[in-house]
Amino acid sequence: MIAESKARGIDTALPTYTRTLVAEALAAGHGHDSYARLVEHFSRG
């Protein structure tokens, strides 16, 4: 999504930020948690 957005000249700030938050949540060991846990992590980002 990010690569395609860049190729079309679309701002990639939101998907890049989201990808970073998800990567941080995974690195913190929350990969097997529910989506609600990811939302909780987003609120801290």
Image (tube, helix red, strand yellow):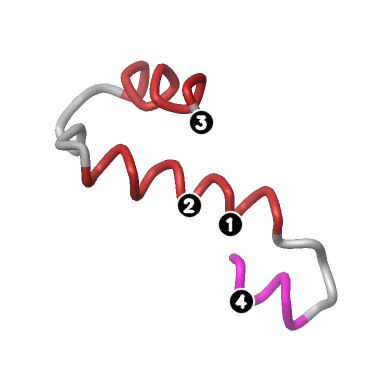
Q: CA distance from mark 2 to mark 3?
A: 12 Å
Q: Which residue is mark 4?
A: 3
Q: Secondary structure at mark 1?
A: helix
Q: Position of residue 25 (x, y in %)?
A: 30, 37
Which of the two discs, 4 and 2, labels the residue nearer the N terminus? 4
Say the numbered circle drawn on residue 45. 3
* Residue located at (58% from left, 49% from top): 17
Please report whichever mark, 2 or 3, sits nearer to the chain's N-terminal start: 2
Callout 1: few (<14), some (14-19), or many (20+) C-alpha neighbours within 10 Å? few
Specify the segment rendered in magenta.
Answer: 1-7
Q: Nearer the viewer, mark 4 or mark 2?
A: 2
Q: In this rendering, which labeled residue sits more in front, label 3 or label 1? A: 3
Tell me where residue 33 appears, x and y as whole percent: 20, 25
Q: Residue furthest right?
A: 9
Mark nearer the viewer, 1 or 4? 1
Q: Secondary structure at mark 4?
A: helix
| Mark 2 to mark 1 CA distance (whole Å) | 5 Å
The amino acid type of the residue labelled 4 equals Ala
Instruction: Please give the residue where the numbered disc 2 appears in the rendered image.
Output: 19
Residue at (61% x, 67% y) in the render: 2
The residue wearing badge 1 is 16
Circles 2 and 1: CB distance less than 8 Å? yes
